[in-house]
Image (tube, rainbow, N blue to C red):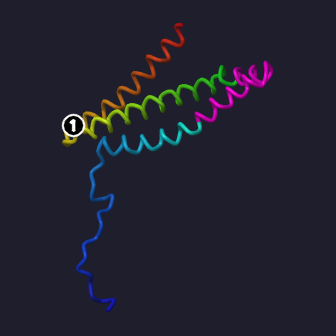
Amino acid sequence: MSDIKSARPLSPHLTVYRFRPTMAMSILHRITGGALYVGTALVVWWLVAAASGPEAFSWASGFFGSILGRLILFGYSWALLHHMAGGIRHLIWDTGAGLGREESTKFAIATLVASLVGTVLLWLVVVIV
């Protein structure tokens, strides 16, 4: 019985698909969703430190004011904006618009560009003000 090949088709494998921008944005959407959990825990830490008194708040503010802290905040703000842009893209798709191959690729690229530009503009406003 083991010598007889099954007539059932094999399920598609990753080697069958060509990597597309929509696939990359799907992966990034999941990664940013996970990163938002960690970033939100840091925001909670900052809020608890603010409620705990000047010494705890000073320590937390010192961390977020450091180069590492600012890098984490920059990444968190990008993850937030990227996840939001991906959600808007999915809302547009829910209306039935932009589902074609070319349109979905344009939406995927626009999601990345919008999140990067939005993050840079946000940080320029924060640094200037």
Q: Around disc 1, counting alpha carbons within 10 Å, would you say few (fewer than 14), some (14 to 19), or many (20 or more)?
A: few
x, y percent for residue 30: 45, 44
**Quadrant holding the C terminus:** top right
Q: Eyeballing the image, is 5 above or below 114?
A: below
Range of magenta residues: 39-62
* 95 sits to left or right of 77: left
Q: Amino acid at mark 1?
A: Ala
* Residue found at x 28% / y 40%: 94
User: Residue sitting at 33 percent across and 58 percent down?
Assistant: 14
For residue 117, what is the image quadrant? top left
Q: Which residue is mark 1?
A: 97
Does residue 107 appear left or right of residue 71 in this picture? left
* Magenta segment includes 40: yes
Quarter of the image where the N terminus is located? bottom left
Task: Tell how many labels.
Answer: 1
- Indicate yes or no whether the magenta region holds residue 128: no
Hey, which quadrant is residue 105 in on the image? top left
Q: Quadrant of residue 95?
A: top left
Residue 76 picture location, percent across and down: 53, 30
